[in-house]
Image (tube, rainbow, N blue to C red):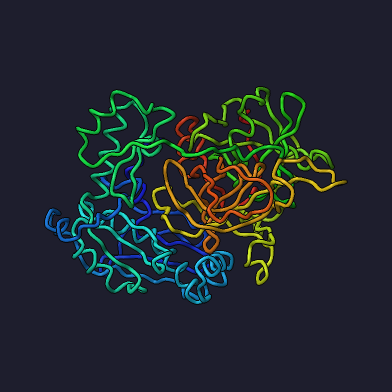
């Protein structure tokens, strides 16, 4: 995916919406650029020219780094914020609060405080990148160290002054870094061009190590002779590492349908294969083209692998009522899978006659939804229960903060004796539904510690408190049956990069739908 220099700042001074509640950041006097409306939740701001797609980390030798860093002359007026009270966040995000409380043995109030801090971290990062382009060096949440938002800077003093008046400033720390976010991102772009690959996917920035990372094993071989020279000529530290360590398995293999219409993220999509067997995936998010036509976003390997060479159709409960849902688009081709992130996506239009079944009948009830389906190992279900989460927009990949608490929904299932369902290979004892966990990495995708099984592929990754779409499940650690491994890792393709890719290839103007799919006139098929 092409690096998006405008992406971080495109979130600057933005409002993250939850219903009518807002979290806003602005400059003290000048008001800043335009912000999002509570109705749409879309990110909006005038971009600065030299922002970055990912963030770097602080170095540890504070005194030496301060001496080496240039002094900043940027505007150091305090950043103002209007965050939501932790009590409101606790009501809006019970599973996220529950995860933190259980994982770190915290009181509910402290867990809610941490989620409230997370809500303001992305717009704060964008603001700092805009105001301190040569000083800001990224941020991350450190849950193990007490729920602290760590901000890295080549010159900590001005940024420390700017955030001193922020709510919960006691849990923000500014630490020294040798290289700014802008320098690291520029180095990544130059290195990617030299290697003939893409910045942001093949060459990324490690925000906590303050380094550029070349990912090998796909487009770049570990023994590529160009690496040594490219590293020597780089303007920042560069390390080389395998794209993925350890075995991984696709998360799409005979998944089960487990939800109800209207179309929401988390719905079961069964897909017949070329060899006569049935596989499938989980629906991710509703997507709308500029023409007004609606699509369902799921994983590309559901319809674009070696066992899917024909035009695939998806069905609701294939062994039961077999209700038609989607069909693979062939003109233009809207599915892509090459075995790496983020190129694992499929945008599926509806089969003929299927749209009216899955559409939302009234505009007043037309908010696009993700199905939040309770499972026994999700502690928040005892207090809130199953429900729908309204999707308010997309969090750009650049604004996904490591350490954030996120939630994922899947429909994988292995039937018990006598049940008539397609077996996804999830393993006996795995319960399909919604679980929450922590973002632990961003190496071309979004890596999380959330349990998932074959059949959950394509399922949505989102933030519970504000309904922002983050990614769709691609692959992850092997696993079968109940969720017993707290360290299990799974990997999500970022929605913002998927939409950029699809729009660059087709010009159809795809965006995450915050309403619908609605019963409105639909243009001709794009198949």
Residue drawn at point x = 72 percent, y = 24 percent: 274
In the drawing, does residue 190 fall left or right of residue 243?
left
The picture quadrant where one finds residue 32 is bottom left
In the foreground, 126 or 351: 126
As displayed, is residue 83 above or below residue 328?
below
Q: How many marks?
A: 0
Query: Residue 193 placed where, x, y %?
Result: 30, 29
Q: Is residue 518 visible?
A: no
As displayed, is residue 131 above or below residue 349?
below
In the drawing, does residue 60 fall left or right of residue 295?
left
Residue closest to the far right: 418
In the foreground, 427 or 166: 427
Q: Is residue 344 visible?
A: yes
Residue drawn at point x = 82 percent, y = 39 percent: 319
As displayed, is residue 173 above or below residue 53?
below
Q: Quadrant of the N terminus?
A: top left
Query: Residue 177 placed where, x, y %?
Result: 23, 54
The picture quadrant where one finds residue 457 is top right
Query: Residue 220 placed where, x, y %?
Result: 38, 28
Query: Residue 226 placed where, x, y %?
Result: 28, 25
Q: Quadrant of the C terminus?
A: top right
Residue drawn at point x = 30 percent, y = 53 percent: 57
């Amino acid at each position: 995916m092409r690096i998006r220099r405008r992406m971080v700042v495109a979130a600057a001074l933005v409002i993250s919406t939850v219903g009518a509640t807002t979290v806003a950041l602005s400059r003290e006097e000048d008001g800043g650029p335009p912000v999002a409306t509570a109705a749409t939740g879309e990110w909006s701001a005038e971009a600065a020219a030299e922002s970055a797609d990912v963030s770097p980390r602080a170095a540890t030798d504070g005194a030496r780094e301060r001496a080496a860093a240039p002094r900043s002359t940027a505007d150091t007026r305090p950043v103002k914020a209007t965050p939501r009270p932790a009590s409101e966040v606790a009501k809006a995000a019970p599973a996220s609060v529950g995860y933190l409380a259980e994982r770190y043995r915290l009181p509910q109030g402290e867990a809610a405080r941490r989620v409230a801090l997370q809500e303001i971290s992305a717009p704060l990062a964008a603001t700092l990148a805009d105001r301190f382009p040569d000083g800001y060096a990224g941020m991350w949440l450190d849950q193990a160290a007490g729920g602290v938002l760590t901000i890295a800077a080549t010159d900590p003093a001005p940024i420390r002054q700017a955030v001193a008046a922020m709510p919960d400033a006691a849990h923000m720390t500014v630490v020294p870094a040798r290289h700014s976010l802008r320098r690291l991102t520029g180095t990544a772009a130059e290195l990617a061009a030299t290697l003939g690959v893409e910045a942001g996917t093949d060459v990324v920035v490690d925000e906590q190590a303050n380094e550029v990372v070349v990912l090998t094993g796909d487009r770049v071989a570990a023994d590529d002779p160009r690496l040594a020279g490219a590293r020597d000529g780089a303007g920042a530290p560069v390390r080389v590492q395998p794209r993925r360590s350890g075995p991984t398995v696709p998360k799409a293999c005979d998944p089960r349908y487990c939800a109800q219409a209207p179309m929401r993220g988390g719905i079961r999509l069964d897909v017949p294969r070329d060899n006569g067997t049935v596989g499938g995936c989980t629906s991710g998010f509703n997507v709308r083209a500029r023409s007004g036509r609606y699509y369902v976003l799921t994983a590309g390997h559901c319809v674009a692998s070696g066992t899917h060479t024909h035009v695939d159709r998806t069905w609701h409960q294939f062994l039961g009522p077999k209700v038609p849902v989607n069909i693979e688009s062939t003109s233009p081709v809207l599915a892509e899978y090459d075995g790496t992130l983020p190129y694992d996506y499929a945008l599926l239009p509806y089969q003929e006659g299927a749209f009216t079944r899955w559409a939302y009948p009234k505009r007043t009830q037309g908010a696009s939804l993700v199905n939040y389906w309770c499972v026994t190992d999700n502690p928040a279900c005892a207090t809130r229960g199953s429900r729908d989460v309204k999707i308010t927009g997309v969090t750009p990949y650049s604004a996904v903060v490591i350490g954030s608490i996120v939630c994922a929904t899947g429909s994988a299932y292995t039937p018990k004796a006598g049940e008539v369902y397609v077996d996804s290979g999830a393993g006996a004892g795995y319960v399909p539904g919604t679980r929450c966990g922590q973002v632990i990495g961003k190496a071309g995708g979004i890596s999380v510690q959330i349990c998932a099984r074959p059949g959950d592929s394509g399922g949505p990754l989102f933030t519970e408190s504000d309904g922002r779409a983050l990614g769709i499940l691609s692959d992850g650690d092997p696993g079968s049956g109940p969720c017993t491994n707290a360290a299990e890792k799974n990997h999500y393709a970022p929605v913002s990069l998927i939409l950029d890719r699809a729009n660059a290839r087709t010009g159809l103007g795809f965006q995450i739908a915050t309403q619908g799919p609605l019963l409105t006139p639909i243009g001709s098929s794009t198949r």
